[in-house]
Amino acid sequence: MSTRKTTLFYAVLIALASVAVGMVIASRLDLSPASSAQTVNVPTSNAAPLSGPIDAATFKNIAKAQIPTVVNIQTEARARTRELTDFFGGGSGGDDLLRRFFGQQTPQAPPQGQGRNAPRRNPREEDGPVTQGAGTGFIIDKAGFILTNNHVVEGADVIRVSLFGGGRTESYAAKVVGRDALTDSALIQLTEMPSTPLTEARFGDSTQMEQGDWVMAIGNPFGLGHTVTVGVISALGREFTTVSRGREQPMLQTDAAINPGNSGGPLLNIRGEVVGMNTAIYTSQAQSSNIGIGFATPINTLRDLVPQLRTGKVTRGVIGVLVDRNFTKSSAEALGVKGGGGALISQVPPGGAASKAGIEPGDVIVEYNGRPVADNEALVAMVIATKPGTSVPVTVVREKQRRTLNVVIEELDLEAETGGRTARGGGRAPESEPTQTGFGMTVEPITPDIAREAELPRNRGGAVVSNVERNSPAFNAGIGPGDIILEVNKQPVSNVSQVSRALQSATPGTPVFLLIWRDGAQIFIALSKR
C-alpha cells in the first residue's frame, strides 16, 4: 500500500473513532439532542350528529369499550392548610355546598406495597402527616398522557396510577406535566409504563350535547374503581366559579351519579366518546355525596387546552374588566345598544389594559377585533384566545354613542388576580334605622368611619348597603352588605333620601343602573325591580 493511501486510511479511521468517542462522551454528559420531541397525540373530535336507537346493549357496550381508558389516581401530599370549602363555599353558610368530589383525604401513614414496580416511599415521621387523596383520569395518548382535574394532583408529592385489569396493589408512578386552575384541569404522564399497550379515549363534540341526551360517567367513587353510572344532560352552560368571581366557566350539568373520587373521570355520550370531565357536585350539609346535580368541564374546552398543558404553561389574554353577569336585552337597549347584546362593563381596575385604553364602567362592548360581541361569554372567549401583546380594536357604546378604542392585550395572571383580592365589605354599618329600597336591600347613612375604612373618595356616595335579602333583585345582581352606592341611573347621590327615592320610584321591569364602591374600585351594576 502506498504511503499516500496509508495516510488516507488512517485519517478516515481516526475520524470515525473520534465520532464514536464523541457520541459516547456526549451520551454520558447528556449533550446529545433528544431523538424526538415527545408531543401529546390529542384525540380528534367526532362532530357527527348523535343518532340511532338505544337498546339493552348500548350502555353495556360503552362500558366494555371505554373502561380500559379510565384510570384511578392515588396521591400523597404533606398536610395542607387549605380545605376544599375555601374554594367552593361551605362551612356554616348556606344549605347547599358546591364541592369538587375529591377522594377522602385523611392524614395517615401511607400503606405499603402500592406498586408492582416500586413501593410508595415512607416519609420520615418528622416530615409531618401525609394527606392521601383519590381521583380519576382518562388516557388520551398511548405514551402515557392522562387528563384529570387540577385539584386531584395539586400539591401532590406522590402520584400513582392504577389501570383497569391490574392487580389490587399494582400501580405506576406519574408526574404532573401541566396544570390549569381556571378549568380545573391537569395533564399528567406515567413515568413507569405497563408491559401492555394503553387504550386511548375517544373525543366527542361537547357543543352537540342537548338537555335530555344520555351520558355515562366512569370513575373511582369512594375508592370503588371503574364504577359506571348512567344519566342525562340536565342543563348546558352552567356558570361555575373555579378560582374567583368573574372567572366563571360554562359546564355541563348531569344527573349521572358521581361522588367523591369521581373527579377527573370522563363523561361519555352514547357513542362512548368523552364529552366532558367530571369536576364538581352539589351536596347538602347533611350529605356529602351524590344528590343528582353534577358538573363536567366540556371536552372542547379541554381539547383546545392540551397543547398548552403539554408545554407546562397556559397563556391567556386579559383586558382587565369585570362584566355584569345579569345584563339583559332591555338593559342593553336602555343603554343605546340596538337589538340588545354586548357585554356590560361593571368594573375597570386601574392600571389594566382596559383602563389604559379608556374603557369605563357602564360601557357596553359590542365589537372585539371587528367581531360582534353577543354576550359576556363571547367576550371572555375572544379575549382569552388573544395572544398577549396584541393591539385589538374594541368598540363600545357609551352615552348611546359608539366609539372604538385600541386595547393592548395583557397576560392573565391568576395568582396575582386572586392573591390581591381583598375581603368584601366597606366597614361596619351604623346603628340607625335601615331604609328599604324595593330591590330587596336596605341602605343606611355613610358614617366617617365607614368612609375611612372603605377609602371612599371625598364627597362621594349616598348610602351604604346594610342588608341584602337572599334571591332578591339586589342579591342576584351581586350587591352585598358594605357596598356604597355612588350613582343611580348615572346621577350622583349624596344621601340616603336621594338613593331611596330614586330606587323606590323605579318601575318594575325597567332597568336601573347603579355605580357602587367596593374594595377601592367603582363597579357598574344593572338590576330590575320585580
Image: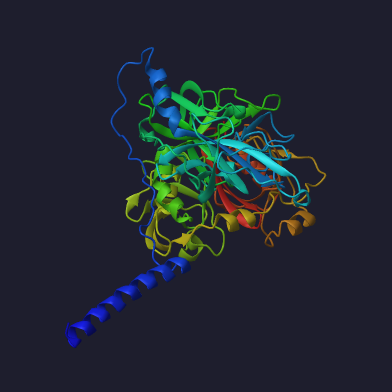
**Does residue 304 lie above or below 220 as drawn?**
below
Q: Position of residue 208 (x, y in %)?
A: 35, 31
Residue 110 in view (yes/no): yes
Q: Image quarter for residue 279?
A: top right
Q: Image quarter for residue 478?
A: top right
**Does residue 236 lie above or below 334 as drawn?**
above
Q: Residue furthest front?
A: 1
Q: Quadrant of the N terminus?
A: bottom left
Left or right of 116: which side holds 3?
Answer: left
Left or right of 337: which side holds 180?
Answer: right
Q: Position of residue 197 (x, y in %)?
A: 40, 38
Which residue is drawn at the image coordinates 42% and 47% (left, top)?
306
**Looking at the image, which is closer to me, 151 or 496?**
151
**Looking at the image, which is closer to me, 352 or 506?**
352
Q: Image quarter for residue 338?
A: top left
**Does residue 503 lie above or below 271 as drawn?**
below
Which residue is drawn at the image coordinates 40% and 35% (left, top)?
199
Q: Position of residue 224 (x, y in %)?
A: 58, 26
How was the colour assigned to the protein in this rendering?
Answer: rainbow
**Looking at the image, which is closer to me, 236 or 304?**
304
Q: Residue furthest bottom?
A: 3
Q: Residue furthest left?
A: 2
**Does residue 274 lie above or below 399 as drawn?**
above
